[in-house]
Image (cartoon, grey):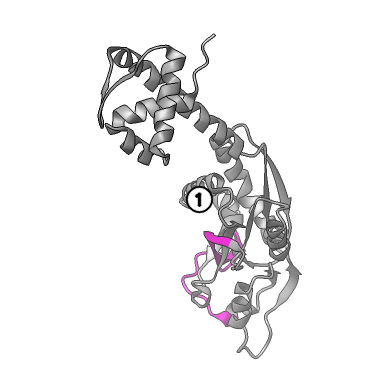
Amino acid sequence: MLLVNIENIEAFVYVIHCGSFNKAAEALYLSQPSVTARIQSLERELDCRLFDRQGKQVQITEEGKRFLPYAQQLLLTYQKGKLHVNRKKSLPEEFRIGCTVSVSNYIIPELLPRLKRHFPNTHYKIVTGITDDIVGKVLNKEVDIGFVRNVNHPNLQSIKFYEDQISLYTYEDHPFVGAERLTVEEIAVQPLVFFECGALDWLRIHRVFENLDQPPNIQIQTDNSEMAKKLVIGKIGISFLPGLCVRQEMADGKLYPVRVPETDGISLQTNLISNHGEHTQFLNAIMEIGKVLTQQ
């Protein structure tokens, strides 16, 4: 039974490709005697001479020429197999994603089907929590990546994933629908359902009403965007909401945006975080998918 060492075949192919034992040794990060030993070992395995040596010059023999295409094919097959094995090994069977509740509601359901198409053999586990909790879980490797509010941590890679504009939304027959310009005073006397997720951006919404003689007419405060949205649809009040959570209701004609110049430019930024150098394939795929989702 013939057993051929793949390293010996590699040395043989490199000598022919580089034109000399010395250059082959440099390319393979080996000493020249090591390359010579591998060629001699291969010649013993095949029971033939592969090269004629004339001083520093080497010439491939007829036997070597006949063996060369098989050697190249063997080496190529081995390298492809090694790449395939390492790729499979690098992809986890389970990929754990930590995210805020809003991301779990509005981004993950659109992201996961596309991610599954990229990595069909991977299973996914989703964990929700507030930004600080998710940051801690990524640091402790309880989850692989996290979708959080705009944060920067020296031990984490943090990439901007999505910026969600905050606007004022009303129900379909509210008197503000179609208004070209509203004053802060007009908004302040309306019943308000105030959604606040704890991000610093919401302080800018509060500041819009700071200089009024009377505080805004906040009827209900909640940290749940789904509740706030349904209360507006139920005509309990109007609300400042992130655009991502109201896409469907706007399409269905249940909610209407109203421009408030004082709140232009206020948005919620979602970042994708991970430990440095980890899960690069997933991060690249998610960022590519994110470009598609944010353009919808």
Label 1 crowding class (10 Å Cα cut-off): few <14, some 14-19, many 20+?
A: some
> In the current view of this chain or complex, which residue is farthest to the top?
1
In the rendered image, the quadrant that contains the N terminus is top right
Q: Determine which quarter of the picture holds residue 140.
A: bottom right
**Does the image show residue 209?**
yes
Q: Determine which quarter of the picture holds residue 282.
A: top right
Q: In this view, does 35 lie above or below 293?
A: above
Q: Which residues fall within the magenta stretch?
A: 157-185
Q: In this view, does 58 lie above or below 219?
A: above
Q: Which of 232 and 143 is in front in this view?
A: 143
Q: Where does residue 84 sit, x and y in percent of width and height?
A: 52, 30
- 122 sits to left or right of 257: right
- 1 sits to left or right of 222: left
Residue type beneath disc 1? Met
Q: Is mark 1 on a helix, strand or loop?
A: helix
Mark 1, residue position: 287
Q: Is residue 210 on the magenta stretch?
A: no
Q: Is residue 26 above or below residue 200?
A: above
Q: Nearer the viewer, residue 56 or 197?
A: 56
